[in-house]
Amino acid sequence: MTLLIRVSRQIQRKSLQNTSLYRIFSESSALRKGPECTDECKWLCGSSEEILSAVRGQVEVRQNFISEEEENALFKEVEAGLRKKRYEFDHWDDAIHGYRETERLQWGAASENILRRVRTVAFPEGSPLLGPVHVLDLDKKGYIKPHIDSVKFCGSTIAGLSLLSDSIMRLVPENNTTDRVDLLLSRRSLYILRDDARFKFTHEILKDEESFFSGQKVPRHRRISVICRNLPM
Ligand SMILES: O=C(O)CCC(=O)C(=O)O
């Protein structure tokens, strides 16, 4: 696959100031929203309550979706293919900096079980899925610039497992670049982006120097994402 990320629209933008972010778990909203809020606030923060409401239901992070053993199984399976490739750093117009990638259709039994679970929780029943799974390996110095995936090639939903490192995925509304939502993609988590969060917001993976969640440094190491997509209807 010539990667979907390359046919997407890239948005050039200076990085945003690290202004104080509005965590869902501010005193008032925590009290108002009850216990489920305490889970969401571990992985979601944003620049305003409004922007958080705009994405709620369309973004999800399931922490510890896979065990260490499962992470190892996936890693072993993809590492052999990745090792043969070199990280790409120098293409100024690419949406990604410092990466190598592959795709895979056939998986061993352990990985296939994990991917089946991903598909079950992430995609609407009967939704046609893209067969090959995309594996993206970001070097420690690598990052993904803000972009919007192409509606021509991508369906409503993307679901990704994060291996080897925590990272921050930032969403910025296309029509209001002062707002933002940050998702903490912890190692071994699954993230899901749906609908407007996919097509009306840019998304990016922050470089190590900018990798903070709610003011706390989140060191970015080498990170591998294993990404499932559905097809456009
Ligand atoms: O590595 C990731 O999880 C994000 C990939 C991405 O931005 C995309 O496929 O559009």
Image: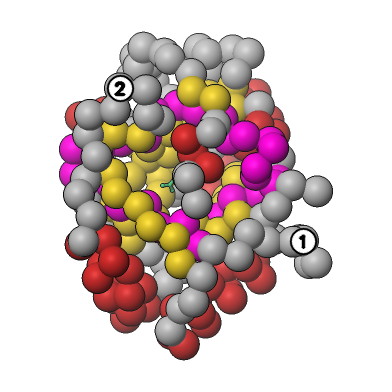
In the image, residue 9 above or below residue 218 = above
Q: Is 162 left or right of 50, judged from the image as shown?
A: left
Disc 1 residue crowd, few under 14, some 14–19, many 20+, Cα 10 Å:
some
Q: Is residue 115 magenta?
A: no
Residue at 60%, 55% (x, y): give it: 229
Residue kind at label 1, given as amino acid type:
Ser
Of helix, strand and loop, which one carries label 1?
A: loop
Q: Is residue 134 magenta?
A: yes
> Foreground: 121 or 108?
108
Residue under the point 35% across and 52% down: 101
The numbered mark, 1 or 2, whose residue comes first in the sequence reads: 2
The x and y percentages for residue 28 are 58, 33
Q: What residue range appears in magenta?
A: 133-161
| Prevailing secondary structure class for the magenta stretch in the rendered image | strand
Foreground: disc 1 or disc 2? 2
Colour logic: secondary structure
Please tell me how crowded label 2 is: few (under 14), some (14-19), or many (20+) other residues with Cα within 10 Å.
Answer: few
For residue 27, side relative to residue 197 (left or right): left
Q: Is residue 64 above or below residue 146?
A: below
- The residue located at (67%, 55%) in the rendering is 230
| Percent coordinates x, y for residue 83 in the rendering | 20, 62
Q: What residue would you read off at disc 2?
A: 92
Q: Horizontally, is 193 left or right of 184 in the view?
A: right
Calculate the distance from the C-alpha at mark 1 to the C-alpha at mark 2: 35 Å
Q: Give amino acid for label 2.
A: Trp
Quarter holding residue 87: top left
Q: Report x, y in % for residue 193.
A: 60, 46
Which secondary structure lies at badge 2?
A: loop
**Mark 1 C-beta closer than 8 Å to ligand 1:** no
Q: Which residue is mark 1?
A: 127
